[in-house]
Image: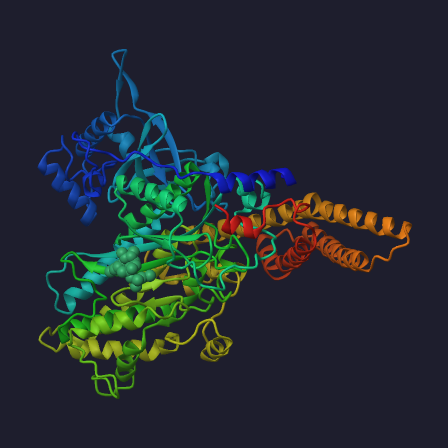
Amino acid sequence: MPSKYSRLSAKKLAVTRTERSIERPVDIQGNLLKVSEYYGENVFHFSTATGIPESVKEELQQVSTLGSHLKKEHAEIVAKAVTEWAIAKGATHFCHWFQPLTGTTAEKHDAFLDFEDDRPIEKLSATQLLQGEPDASSFPNGGCRSTFEARGYTSWDLTSPMFLLDGANGKTLCIPTAFVSYYGDALDIKTPLLRSVTILDDLATEFMNLIGFKNTKKVTVTCGAEQEYFLIDKSFYFARPDLVMTGRTLLGSLSHKNQQLDDHYFGRIPGRVLACMEEIDFELHKLGIPAKTRHNEVAPGQFELAQIFRDANVAADNNQLVMATIKDVAEKHDFISLLHEKPFAGVNGSGKHLNWSMATDEGLNLLEPGKEPHSNMRFLAVTAIVIEAVYRRAKLLRMAIASQGNDHRLGANEAPPSIISVFTGTNLEEIFKSIKDGENFSPTGEVTLDLGAHQLANLMMDNTDRNRTSPFAFTGNKFEFRAVGSTQSIGFPLSILNSAVAEVFSESIDFLKSEIKGDSSKDIDTALMKLTKKLLKNSWSVVFNGDGYSDDWLKEAKKRGLPNLKTTADALPVLLDTEQTKYLVESKIFKQTELDMRYNVLVERYNTLREIEFTTLVGLVEKNVLPCSLEYKTKLGGVIKLQKDIGLESSVEVELYKKMNFACETLYSNLMTFKNTIANMPEDEKVRSVEIANTIYPISEQVAKACSDIEDLVPNDLWQLPTYYEMLFLR
Ligand code: ADP
Ligand code: MG
């Protein structure tokens, strides 16, 4: 339990810490190695590995790109090669690394140690590489199975490279895997993601072939996630039970200087933070994760890391490792990283911008505006397909980013609203509008954009990043899904987005086929134009280039009939809405049982996390805020009595006392209402989630507000919890 002493000593510690430096690798002459020389040293690439014959490498390549089946004897060769590689690097254990529905990652380590003729040896068999059998009953399954049929399987995903996890005293080989139940139901985030990229690949490839790109063999989903996070000194963290228990401050008076000056964004990175970022990048680069950008974010104490985009499945695995690495390295620097969407009220929260596009095996980005009119038609049609997908599956996309943490951000004037709309930028809007309205293809008015012009990309790039208020923005040659929460695994929103786009691709292919009726000499551009027009006409209401934070937009969106699912409790039931989910099931990206399971897991998770917040808040009020208020009142009362004894008036003291008394009474009565509602929560998880979102959470905010009022009144030396000022500014 924190005491005033721990707050004081935390402050002392925080301001006297020194920067941690690490030893960067050097060559034999002692010169520092370049990043390119150690990049990926902890990753096993079968393409460059020794001990794997070229023919097997080719087969592996085929399996990972075209999804064919791997022969067991070839798996044996890989298992042997990776074991030798890992052991030479000091590994003692291996594990199947997977992403259960907790949103984090799971690993169960096994030693390489085995016996051959009673002799100890190191070994990883093909079976151990290909398949694991963790006890599935301890992972969330949404009531999918009972514990007595707890069998679950992990299965090697050879499209995501194996890597070494560095411990202080050894290394572990991590094998990325999918995690499914005995009946093949996906118990993880990766499996549906893999299904979604496969289906999108098939459809987008067919689409490309149909419109004249005969050589396209494969279309991959590309993704680059920007990760935001806070860093605070470790000592403050441990003196704040709310941070430890819930990842966010449940109460706290705003410091006087917070972010009004806008001086933190892109500002000079504090030395101790930079040292930490350098080590984070170093670790990520060794893991073959292309960390690229690092900078201060808008709020004090808030930072960002972005990596170079790559194939979506690997990007999703990478982002899990990015979050884990930020956490681990931060602690070595005596920081704690807060990945929560809203660790502090009153300053910006954290999100994760999901940059998303599709690229062919020949390297063509489908969302690249391009130079030739022909490729522009491809660009316009594909962009219209994405817009239609977002329009049609706005509810599913909103659901996919729903969490109790993200509820604090969405619609809170610092992040996109919970209304899903698409930002195109004005240039593209003009072009699309003319297509939709059947006007001449070339844009009108002062926009003198030649569609075939080289400037198009530049112009649009310059013009498109201005709108930070859009949840889904076109930024030059990709879309940016900006409403994703900072803690969440990107795999789930990616699966939903991919599925939504696949659905529209599928219909577009049918449409194009019926337009050209098997006669490939028919003008495909005319058919594409017709498709683009049709899609845009249908989805135009989702296009919005104005200020997403404004009240006008709320009204306008309502008029347009766009859904506005304000809270997680509103958003999660979309999983049970068969009109919304029918394509997910038909396309086999999710089975119905998997959707039901996800609903159950997510709603339970929402409720549990909120309940932990509620009980933690009650504890803070009873153990910290109220006792400290009473202490202050006792002090004031003593002075008042003393002055009365010697015949002095105490107008100031009495005034302060009254204020304290009022604040205490307010807090106490809010607390009583709060405790009462918590004690009488409905049993049913769904009903409970609605009650929590609409009734109990707002009461908890009133309790928090009453605490902040008290924090403002009591003297600094009596207040026990580290303050916003200390946590955000002292390091
Ligand atoms: P912006 O400043 O508009 O956000 P950046 O070039 O800084 O653009 O890119 C931000 C993120 O977008 C990076 O992670 C980057 O790798 C990623 N990105 C760039 N191009 C693509 C693409 N074609 N597909 C997916 N992600 C991309
Ligand atoms: Mg960006």
What colouring does the structure picture have? Answer: rainbow
What is the quadrant of residue 698 in the picture?
A: bottom right
Q: Is residue 175 left or right of residue 301?
A: left
What is the quadrant of residue 323 in the picture?
A: top left
Quarter of the rendering occupied by the N terminus: top right
Q: Which x, y percent locates residue 427? A: 28, 78
Give the number of callouts. Answer: 0
Identify the residue at image location x=64%, y=51%. 683
**Which of the two residues, 346 or 579, is positioned nearer the viewer here?**
346
Q: Is residue 662 left or right of residue 682?
A: right
Q: Is residue 34 above or below residue 653?
A: above
Q: Which x, y percent locates residue 27? A: 18, 32
Q: Is residue 414 left or right of residue 649?
A: left
Identify the residue at image location x=47%, y=66%. 418
Q: Is residue 248 above or below residue 666?
A: above
**Which of the two residues, 70 or 673, is positioned nearer the viewer here?**
673
- Classify the position of ligand 2 by quadrant: top left, top right, bottom left or bottom right: bottom left
Q: Is residue 56 left or right of residue 296?
A: left
**Which of the two residues, 179 or 477, is positioned nearer the viewer here?**
477
Q: Which x, y percent locates residue 82? A: 22, 31
Residue 342 visible within the image = yes
Residue 186 visible within the image = no
Q: Which x, y percent locates residue 260? A: 50, 64
**Which of the two residues, 460 or 220, is positioned nearer the viewer here?**
460
Which residue of the protein is positioned furthest toward the top in this rendering? 118
